[in-house]
Image (cartoon, rainbow, N blue to C red):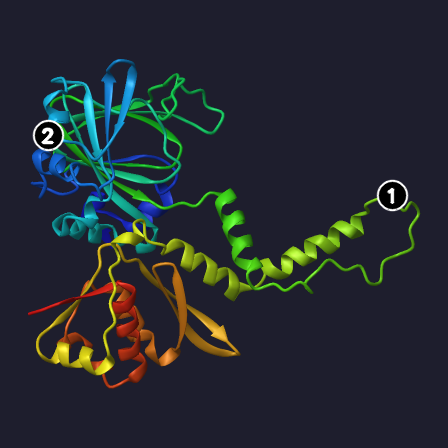
Amino acid sequence: MNIPILGNISVEEFLRDYWQKKPLLIRQAIPDFVSPVDGDELAGLSLESEVESRIILEHGDEPWELHHGPFTEQTYAELPESHWTLLVQAVDQFVPEVADYLKDFEFLPRWRIDDLMISYATPGGGVGPHFDNYDVFLLQAEGRREWKVGQLCDSNSPLLPHPDLRILDGFDTSDSWVLEPGDMLYLPPRLAHWGTALDNCMTWSIGFRAPSTAEVITHYTDFVARFLTSEDRYGDAGMTPLQDPNEIRREDIERVRQLLREQLDDDNLLLSWFGQHMTEPRYPEFLQGHELGESTLVEFLQDGGALVRSPAARLAWSQLELDGEPAILLFSCGSSRPFPEHLVGFIQYLCSQDLLTMDNLQPWLDRDEAVTLLCELVKQGSLECMDE
């Protein structure tokens, strides 16, 4: 199936030829695109303490000066007319009209999406030549920005000396394009890129979560350790006779490897950790849950109320076997819980919908497990009550 936002190429072609491999320029990925947020509104968000924001000034008291928000109106009054950029993280969590555009990217796992950052830049503004360790789609929202792409980078790529910014010391341009509103550029991980505003412009960056190997190993071993007892230890029953008591032999290392493999080969344990890790909310403090009894919830829905998915909530599901029986594992904001297979349709629906009403929940409200789960998600803050 061809996807308009990919320039009408198929998902299969995009995943085969571009995803994590090479850039893709899509002219008019969203034709006649008009941003629901303008530069003034973006600056207004940066005044709020709960919003993560930065300003990068190329020619301040020192090269590439970085300032962290929240900002004030005086901050903007003192900025020069050019060569600065405002970046506001996770705008999708504050502006529902922005979050709606993330649905255009559901040809990729929803749990992989990190956030939608918006940058506003004055002429000449940018963040310098750099690279990211994750995939990103760059959608031009207002004005024009020139994008250059260069070499593949890694942790050994030379950087300019800077305490906070990772700006490349050297850039080998291989392609460049000027993007106008509605145009979009996909960039795979580690590809050097450099964006420069040609006039006052705004760019949306849709980034994807990609845990590092170090993060996977560290977090997973911490997770596994919670389930191990002091009796789970290295053992060497059946060892062969020693030739030198000071030697660590291959068979000793094999025992260690087997000890580790027993944990790594536990599919359910690995699945539980991964789903919890990938659904951890970026801003858990935004989840405001409250207690709601099951009968009260049903009455609330019958009276025309609705349950709305919190912008901070992350949900996902997977299939597994428990005690030889098929089951469904629901992940919600860093936690997980198994359910019987007959609730698979309900779990899938919860993960895919942002608005739940009596009409679309009716088929499941006669099942106690389903109503209990809805109450638990309200208590967690993943679902919020909205009156008619």
In the depicted structure, whether residue 183 falls above or below residue 365: above
The span from disc 2 to disc 1 (Cα, nearest Å) is 70 Å
Which quarter of the picture shows residue 135?
top left
Q: Give the class, few, some or many, for how many residues have Cα within 10 Å of label 1's Cα (few <14, many ≥20).
A: few
Q: Residue at x 40, y 36 (%)?
A: 133
In the depicted structure, whether residue 247 falls above or below residue 126: below
Does dot 2 land on a helix, a strand or a loop? helix
Q: Identify the disc placed on residue 246.
A: 1
Q: Is residue 136 left or right of 30 when viewed as pictured?
A: right
Q: Nearer the viewer, residue 194 or 386?
A: 386
| x, y percent for residue 240 | 88, 56
Q: Residue at x 17, y 36 (%)?
A: 46
In the depicted structure, whether residue 381 falls above or below residue 127: below
What amino acid does circle 2 point to? Glu
Which quarter of the picture shows residue 341?
bottom left
Q: Nearer the viewer, residue 197 or 180?
A: 197
Q: Nearer the viewer, residue 310 or 260?
A: 310
- The answer to whether mark 2 and mark 1 are in CB contact below 8 A is no
Q: Identify the disc placed on residue 207.
A: none
Residue 257 visible in the current orientation: yes
- Disc on the earlier residue, 2 or 1: 2
What amino acid does circle 1 point to? Asn
| x, y percent for residue 282 | 32, 49
Q: Give the class, few, some or many, for how many residues have Cα within 10 Å of label 2's Cα (few <14, many ≥20).
A: few
Q: Nearer the viewer, mark 2 or mark 1?
A: 2
Residue at the spot of label 2: 73
